[in-house]
Amino acid sequence: MKVKILLAEDDPDFGMILKQYLELEDFEVSWFQNPQDILDHLEVSDFPFHLGILDIMMPNIDGFSLAKIILKEKSNFPLLFLTAKNQKIDRLTGLKIGADDYINKPCDPEELVLRIKNILKRTLSTTLEKNVKIGEYFLDTEKLMLFHEKESIRLTIREQKLLLYLLDYNKKTIKRNDILDSLWETNDYFSGRSLDVFISRLRKYFQHDPKIKIQSLRGVGFEIDFPIN
């Protein structure tokens, strides 16, 4: 499975160079010169990208504003900022928004690839495993589909991220606050209620296999038991 990269860069020459180099490194690149075109993808539940590379200085929508819009809909989406400026304020702004990394233009393509791979190791190592067998179920992470002989379920991006996070802690107890901090990036009443809704959905999705358990531990979090084949 190829890593799908969203590239937002309005400079046609630099954008083409980055796209071609990243494709030589076996990444699948969708290049957008107009950041407005990216917003159309946010309206679709199947957001097909694993990582975004955003130029900060773009017309109509700058990279910071675009990042805020993306993260509002696709929380925890890995982002790397590109900028021609070398100012401290840019770096701080990007980090506050939620950037995973930051690199100045013109950048060394080899350094960019290294940074991308480091981000993927930190954030997407599990999600890049395309097929996961969970008890009587089969998860296709590329298509966001959960299959059982009795039904097929299309997952949202966040449902799959939560499921994969739980799989990382299989047979263990997960603290509620850790999930909120990692996937919701906030820990308030409303995010807590949202987490409860998503947990209820997952329990319903796995109702056909009684061996699969997502047990609530009052005041602590959840105890997970997924039979992995």
Image: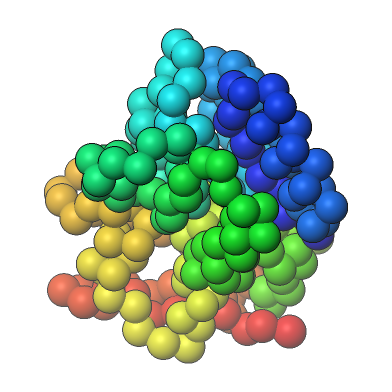
Residue placed at 42% from the left, 55% from the top?
A: 100
Between 143 and 147, the residue placed more toward the observer is: 143
Residue 135 point in image, percent of width and height: 68, 77
Residue 182 lies in quadrant: bottom left
Number of marks in the rendered image: 0
62 left or right of 180 in image: right
64 left or right of 19 in image: left
Residue placed at 44% from the left, 25% from the top?
A: 57
Between 225 and 185, the residue placed more toward the observer is: 185
Residue placed at 15% from the left, 49% from the top?
A: 189
Q: In the image, is residue 130 above or below residue 105?
A: below
Q: In the image, is residue 134 above or below residue 143?
A: below
Residue 228 lies in quadrant: bottom right
Q: Residue furthest top?
A: 60
Residue placed at 43% from the left, 31% from the top?
A: 56
Residue 222 point in image, percent of width and height: 34, 75
Between 5 and 227, the residue placed more toward the observer is: 5
Between 193 and 101, the residue placed more toward the observer is: 101
Q: Quadrant of the N terminus?
A: bottom right
Q: Quadrant of the C terminus?
A: bottom right
Residue 43 at least partly seen: no
